């Protein structure tokens, strides 16, 4: 028997109050009982997204909402700008190319942050561009992009701005309306502290205009169907009722703590994680670290082993690198239901694994450095 700690950047642990809701008898989704849950959840989502617009729910992983943000807005032959800085940003280009969309790249090397000026240049050089797709917190590298500045730039053009905030919402300050973001997508298994399987999407009026002329093929991911059902507190197809009932509970927990406090809690955890990692002599990876996951460079020959031994021997799950970063970085998540104590457990076990692998470190240093940060708060 081994006790498990989930410190991965999705899925994340679920608070017991939320898990209990997932065990309740199933509600039927065409009832007033469900409609009342739906209404409550819709209100909570608007707060988390910081928007006055409707937020729709669909049964899919976050990528389903990403696909929806492509097929619901665009038409064959359209041009878009993709500003990627990692694996998830690249996914925008892959989805769009899969539908025959012309992708103009304003992407940067993995680990760097997207350059707003490159987006501005791309828009100026390609006045027909319909949309700019980018990522808020790039979970694959651990950096956060300056969405506010990008929002200012795109708002001055005819293009709409679509942001993947799947891992960043709840954990890091994000303001859809204030930052002039037209479309935001997210998912249940990160900051929302739920099981995987529920995706979210919201659209501005400017983005709705595009949906009217959109001609890409679609059925399940046609956002107009979701808008129509929203008016009666329903979804067009059977929703994951269990997840939505549990979402009501997690939104309640977020509201009780306060969204701004949630942002600050994560900021503190991120600071402590960075201090701890640095105290071990490891180098942080990424140009502008986000507040929901911390990445560190590790010697390539032990990268994979660290993750494996942590999980198998200590029950601590963290993530390694994706794509070209496989084996080269480790990623410690502190999003969702992860607290100070979890972080200290993770760092302590990391120290043991590094020692075991022959890396010269002083045991206790990461934990001590993290404690210093946590005590400052
Ligand atoms: C997790 C994640 C995704 C993918 O979400 P799925 O739910 O696995 O489809 C996309 N983008 C970012 C930034 C993520 O963190």
Image: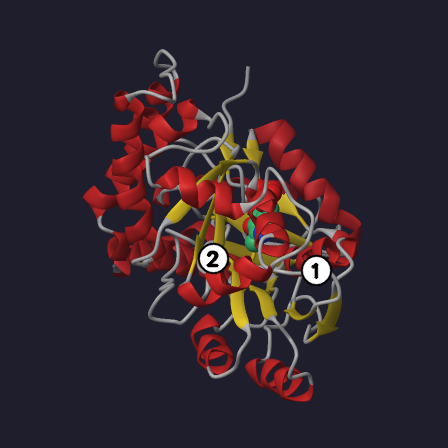
Q: Is residue 363 visible?
A: no
Residue that carries the numbered disc 1 in the rendered image:
90
Q: Quadrant of residue 135?
A: bottom right
Graded by Cα atoms within 10 Å as few (under 14), some (14 to 19) or many (20 or more), the crowding at tag 1 reads: some
* Relative depth, front residue between 341 and 255: 255
Q: Quadrant of residue 124?
A: bottom right
Left or right for 151, reference 266: right
Q: Which disc, if any, is residue 172? A: none
Q: Residue at x 38, y 22 (%)?
A: 29
Quadrant (top left, top right, bottom left, bottom right) of the C terminus: bottom left
Coloration mode: secondary structure
Label 2 CB, ligand 1: below 8 Å? Answer: no
Image spot of residue 6 (x, y percent): 51, 35
* Relative depth, front residue between 7 and 149: 149
Left or right for 151, reference 262: right
* Relative depth, front residue between 49 and 173: 49
Residue that carries the numbered disc 2 in the rendered image:
184
Secondary structure of the residue carrying tag 1 is: helix
Secondary structure of the residue carrying tag 2 is: strand
Left or right for 127, reference 243: right
Q: Residue at x 40, y 71 (%)?
A: 180
Image spot of residue 273 (x, y percent): 46, 55
Image spot of residue 201 (x, y percent): 47, 50
Q: Residue at x 38, y 17 (%)?
A: 28
């Amino acid at each position: 028997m081994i006790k498990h700690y989930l410190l991965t950047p999705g899925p994340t642990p679920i608070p017991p109050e939320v898990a209990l809701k997932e065990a309740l008898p199933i509600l039927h989704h065409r009832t007033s009982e469900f409609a009342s849950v739906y209404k409550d959840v819709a209100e909570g989502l608007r707060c988390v997204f910081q928007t006055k617009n409707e937020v729709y729910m669909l049964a899919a992983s976050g990528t389903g909402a990403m696909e929806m943000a492509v097929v619901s807005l665009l038409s064959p032959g359209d041009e878009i700008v993709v500003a990627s800085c990692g694996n998830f940003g690249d996914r925008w280009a892959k989805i769009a190319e899969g539908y025959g969309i012309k992708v103009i790249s304003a992407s940067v090397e993995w680990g760097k942050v997207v350059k707003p000026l490159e987006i501005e240049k791309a828009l100026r050089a390609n006045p027909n561009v319909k949309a700019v797709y980018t990522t808020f917190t790039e979970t694959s590298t651990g950096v956060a992009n300056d969405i506010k500045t990008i929002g200012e730039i795109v708002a001055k053009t005819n293009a709409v701005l679509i942001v993947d905030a799947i891992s960043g919402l709840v954990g890091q300050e994000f303001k859809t309306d204030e930052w002039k973001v037209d479309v935001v997508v997210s998912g249940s298994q990160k900051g929302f502290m739920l099981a995987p399987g529920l995706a979210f999407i919201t659209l501005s009026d400017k983005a709705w205009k595009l949906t009217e002329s959109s001609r890409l093929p679609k059925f399940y991911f046609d956002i107009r169907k979701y808008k129509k059902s929203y008016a009666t507190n329903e979804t067009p197809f059977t929703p994951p009722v269990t997840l939505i009932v549990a979402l009501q509970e997690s939104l309640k927990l977020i509201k009780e703590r306060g969204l701004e406090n949630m942002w600050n809690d994560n900021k503190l955890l991120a600071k402590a994680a960075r201090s701890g990692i640095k105290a071990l002599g490891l180098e942080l990876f990424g140009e502008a670290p986000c507040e929901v996951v911390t990445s560190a460079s590790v010697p390539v020959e032990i990268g994979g082993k660290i993750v494996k031994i942590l999980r198998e021997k200590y029950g601590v799950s963290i993530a390694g690198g994706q794509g070209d970063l496989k084996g080269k970085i480790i990623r410690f998540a502190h999003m969702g239901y992860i607290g100070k104590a979890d972080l200290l457990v993770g760092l302590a076990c990391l120290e043991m694994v590094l020692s075991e692998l022959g890396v010269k470190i002083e045991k206790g240093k990461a934990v001590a450095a993290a404690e210093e940060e946590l005590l400052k708060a």
